[in-house]
Image (cartoon, rainbow, N blue to C red):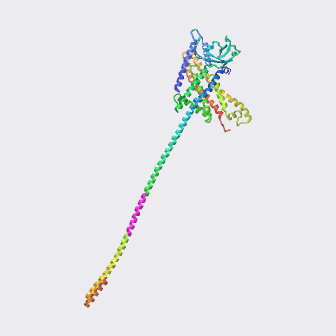
Amino acid sequence: MDKLLSEFSLGLFFWQCILFIGLVLLLKKFAWKPILEAINDREEGIKNALASAEEAKKEMQNLTADNANLLKEARAERDAMMKEAREIKEKMVSEAKEEAREEATKMIELAKSSIEQEKHAAIAELKKEVGELSIVIAKAVIKKELSSQGDQAKLVEGMLKDITLN
Amino acid sequence: MKKITFLLFLVSFVSVAQHNEKTDQVKPTEEKSLKVTIKEYISHHLLDSYDFGLYSFKDDQGKTIHRGFPLPVILWDGGLKVFSSSKFHHGETVAEVGGNYYKVDHNKIYKTDAAGTITYDAEHHATNEKPLDFSITKNVMVIFLVGLLMFLMFSRMAKNYKKNALPKGMGRLLEPIILYVRDDIAIPNIGTKHYKKYMSYLLTVFFFVWIINLLGLTPLGVNVTNNIAVTFALALFTFLFTTFTGNKNYWKHIFWMPGVPVPMKIILAPIELLGAVIKPFSLLIRLYANITAGHIVLMSIIGMMFIFNNWLGSSLSFVLAIALSLLELLVAALQAYIFTMLSALYFGSAVEEHDDH
């Protein structure tokens, strides 16, 4: 301890203090501060860049997922639309068929009934015609046949026979 | 990093070679005088000096020749006295400045008369008057050179960052070390909230001690950190910085320890107060003792090479000296780390905020 104290040099201590304070202050201003700031800035920059890259990646993933979803949706929609269209088409076709069939049946019915009517009318006309004709014939026959009594009776008889047969 | 380690390794080789030359020139007449010479050389090496001696030897007439250059001596003795240390002729003559006479004795400057008489007391301490000595000694010159080197190195590195976000050249080596000091010394011990105000001090201390320690391993004979004045100054700054940045909590834990009964508080206060002083004191002793011990052991082993004086012992010492030089390289960095680490720990305790008790 005694040796230590006797070795202690005040001059060296004095210069060391001055130098060291000066050195700390100078280095702080011209070296440590700019160096530490630059390193800090760089680290921040790297951290930010990494974070934004990560974010971009996530966004990208989201976008891809969105795209896939959209595509799926669109496809589903298209399928649905096509199905609907097909259904509508089928429905329309079947409806049209039904309608056509109905129409046809109706027309057939109508035709049938009108044919029936026409037939009836024709029959009635024919009957009337035949009546008139028979009257004419009968007139003529009567005119001719009434000249002979016997013949007249024969004729009437014959005619009656026919009529009843008819 | 590898390159630098290799260079330093080479340098320690050169150092060994030079020591070889020096001790050979002494040419001892008997075994004992060689041992004494080595011992004196080691203790002389550990001291500061007023000139920058590179090497010395004895010529054919037995006269000691010194090679090196003188440094300015600055004294305050009733007025500022500045003169070259060459006036002392390596402590062999009396220097006369402005009517006063000065002489170097055991590496200290004393005021004396024209004949250079130095009186000693019973314990062989010089009793002559000592002028206030602010000389630029070898160590002072080295710390200024190191300061200049650090300033140039780091301000250039800082300038580089203005142009480019990535370090260039020297910065590539230094940036990981700076980051290490920040991420593994400052932040874990002080905390993210307060560490910024201590960073300049911690970085400066770390690089200063490290570079000085490394210079101590070169053959220049520089030994700054094994001078108690330097480590004392560094520890004093740590102490002052801790004391003046200590928050309420820090002082409360010293003078009125929370969570213990009152009589205990009274007993603890002086102990804690003493602890606050002893902590930085341990810093200065640790750095001083480690570096001094390293120098003494390394030089002793080098000295053993000449004492053994046979191929087996000398070569073994040589291998041992190389191994120890490598170990000292590690110690140089380790001591810088420990000093910085403990400083950070003390700063951390000064700004710690506990809410738990």
Looking at the image, can residue B296 be seen?
A: no
The image position of residue A147, as x and y in percent, is: 25, 90
Furthest-right residue in this view? B263
| Image quarter of the C terminus of chain B | top right
Q: Is residue B315 left or right of residue B288?
A: left
- The magenta region covers A85-106
Q: Is residue A142 left or right of residue B52?
A: left
B348 over A18 or under it: above or below: below
Furthest-bottom residue in this view? A149
Q: Quadrant of residue B74?
A: top right
Main SS class of the magenta portion in the image:
helix
Q: Quadrant of residue B53?
A: top right
Q: Is residue A40 left or right of residue A67?
A: right
Residue at x 70% of width, y 30% of height: B273
Residue at x 32% of width, y 81% of height: A128
B357 over B282 or under it: above or below: below
The image position of residue A114, as x and y in percent, is: 36, 73
A74 over A7 or under it: above or below: below
Q: Is residue B53 magenta?
A: no
The image position of residue A61, as x and y in percent, is: 49, 45
Furthest-top residue in this view? B61
Q: Is residue A104 magenta?
A: yes
Q: Nearer the viewer, residue A3 or B118?
A: B118
The image position of residue B161, as x and y in percent, is: 54, 31
